[in-house]
Amino acid sequence: MGAMLESVPVCCPACRRERLYSAPSYPCACGAAVTPRLDRRTAPTAVVHRAWEEEWITVRCPACGRHDQWPQPELGCACGTVMRIPVTGTPDAREGATSPPSPRPARRPFRPIAIRTARDAVTATAVYLGRLGHRDIRRADQRPTSGIGLAARGLLAQVDPGVRPASLRDVECLWLTAMAESSECVYFSLSGYAPDARARADSLAVPLFVLDLTGVPRPVNAAAGALDARGGD
């Protein structure tokens, strides 16, 4: 039976409202789930401006020792403030940490993460890519035309949490960047795709997924359907 997720009280620095927060778990390539250890001694801080290097933390899997980068834990308050939750030490291994590693990472069960923020969309995408068997998921070296770029060995993914459908230019730029890096590519959007973007993706065999608010990626073209089926093998 897996350990209970750690919950800590956090106090909003703007309105002083207090609530419980549990850090999300992330899938290690060895099959264990790792969770950043929350720092109870340090108060959360309000996110005033975004800095790319502050968006990620490095966590170590105690089951295999692998270090991976994942989004910095954050929590939105009802007053509108976004809080950055401090972490410390080595993350705990959750479900699967004491079990033998799965010989094929794509067989791990998919545990979607509900999407409330752009960061949640990135985390949900990373979890899904881990289910497909991709390891060492990290932020991409180049920023995409919109949204956030993720990369793994041989793969470039674009996560678009915007309110407009992804455009033809978005799809073509992702494909061109992936071609330059000799990688496959895949697009995840919260708001779907313009008709010409879908048509161009079909001609280029770019998998297109729509992220619903439960965190489940839904294939919207044949290339995505084939990729999703491969992940279920």
Image: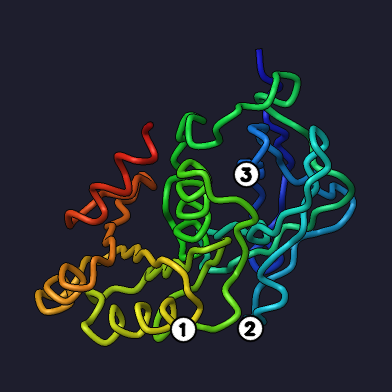
Q: Examine the rendered structure and indicate whether residue 2 appears above or below residue 209.
A: above
| Closer-to-camera residue (20/212) | 212
Q: Examine the rendered structure and indicate whether residue 225 appears above or below residue 64.
A: below
**51 relative position to 60: left or right:** left
Task: Locate the N terminus and report the quarter of the image it occupies.
Answer: top right
Please tell me the numbered disc located at residue 141.
none
Please tell me the numbered disc located at residue 26.
3
| Closer-to-camera residue (64/210) | 64
Between the C-alphas of marks 3 and 1, the distance is: 30 Å
Q: Examine the rendered structure and indicate whether residue 186 appears above or below residue 196.
A: above
Q: Are marks 3 and 1 in contact (CB under 8 Å)?
A: no
Label 3 neighbourhood size at 10 Å, few (<14), some (14-19), many (20+)? many
Among the two numbered marks 3 and 1 on one chain, the one whose residue lies closer to the N terminus:
3
Q: Helix, strand, or loop for circle 1?
A: helix
| Closer-to-camera residue (50/18) | 50
Q: Helix, strand, or loop for circle 2?
A: loop
x%, y% of residue 195? 9, 74
Q: Which amino acid, mark 3?
A: Tyr
Q: Which residue is mark 2?
A: 49
Please tell me the numbered disc located at residue 180.
1
Between the C-alphas of marks 3 and 2, the distance is: 25 Å
Q: Helix, strand, or loop for circle 3?
A: strand
**Image-quadrant location for residue 224:** bottom left
Image point 50% across, 73% down: which residue?
149
x%, y% of residue 139? 60, 69
Label 1 neighbourhood size at 10 Å, few (<14), some (14-19), many (20+)? few
Image point 23% across, 73% down: which residue?
204
State the residue lying farthest toward the top: 1
**86 relative position to 218: left or right:** right
